[in-house]
Amino acid sequence: MEDFDAFARLVTALRPWLGQLAVVGGWAHRLQRFHRLANPPGHLPLRTRDTDLAFSTDAALAGDLRTALRDAGFTEERFGDDAPPATHYRLGEEDAAFYAEFLTPLHGSGVKRNGAPDATVSKAGVTAQKMRYLDLLLVSPWSVRVGPKLGVPVAADVDLLVPNPTSFMVQKLLIIRIVQPARRRRTFSTSTTPWSCSVPRWVSCTGVAGTGSPSDGREDGQESGDGRSGLVRRGHRHDSRGGADSTGPTAHA
């Protein structure tokens, strides 16, 4: 199955929750180039067989994501000794099959009171892995509209949240020193490409994630949003169809 076909099945299954989920990791890198502020290069983006979906610790996530994924043909693959165990939601049986995993910010020491690792959490039927500095990816996310015209075979165009490039780069730099060695190699190899393919002209590598940008016309630190979805504490959600969208979800990063 082509990766955009599999990705379309994923976002179709999760459509009711897309306002509370941000697409992060390698798929964020691919989707950022569809934003109107992006400067996409001529080369193809890096491809990855997994889709990372992040949500805030206080996102409501009403309903049952697990059932929605199962009904769309995804199966659970559990691994590790954590409680609950880390879980991939796989589409297909082959070794290189497409899969999704959920992530949420890690706060505190990373150790529970009983001494066990505070590595995972269950919400709305799915298990999410906790990750340090993930909050940054939920600050002022971009909204990107995708559909058949962009190669994503969904029935109707859909709006997806992806990290803004500044947050994306800063979070990558921060986690390089703390991720496990195997994951560190993958993170380092993919962290540099988005800088060249998706960074808009106004982004500075010295900028601070979550502050106002020249495209939204606000002073640093001004808050927006209506607090409905649990994403984006500060700043506007940048919309691929016309600048900042002040109606976007609010985050508690």
Image (spheres, grey):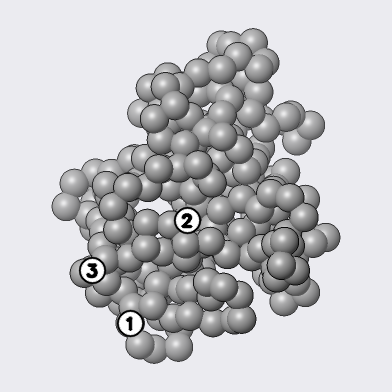
Asked if 108 appears above or below 46 in the picture, the reply is above
Q: Position of residue 200 (x, y in %)?
A: 59, 33
- Mark 2: which secondary structure? strand
* Residue kind at label 1, given as amino acid type: Gly
Q: Mark 2: few, some, or many residues within 10 Å (few <14, many ≥20)?
A: many
Q: Position of residue 85 (x, y in %)?
A: 53, 75
Asked if 131 appears above or below 171 in the picture, the reply is below
Residue at the image position 61 percent from the left and 50 percent from the top: 105
**Would residue 27 be visible to someone looking at this image?**
no
- Please name which of the two marks, 3 or 1, marks the residue nearer to the observer: 3
Residue linked to disc 2: 53
Asked if 243 appears above or below 85 in the picture, the reply is above
Residue linked to disc 1: 92
**Which image quadrant for residue 46?**
bottom right
Residue at the image position 43 percent from the left and 47 percent from the top: 21
Residue 203 is left or right of residue 43, and the answer is: right
Q: Which of 189 and 86 lies nearest the eye of the viewer?
A: 86
* Residue kind at label 2, given as amino acid type: Leu
* Residue kind at label 3, given as amino acid type: Ala
- Mark 1: which secondary structure? loop
Residue linked to disc 3: 72
Residue at the image position 37 percent from the left and 63 percent from the top: 125
Q: Which of 198 and 185 lies nearest the eye of the viewer?
A: 185
- Please name which of the two marks, 1 or 2, marks the residue nearer to the observer: 2
Q: CA distance from mark 2 to mark 3?
A: 17 Å
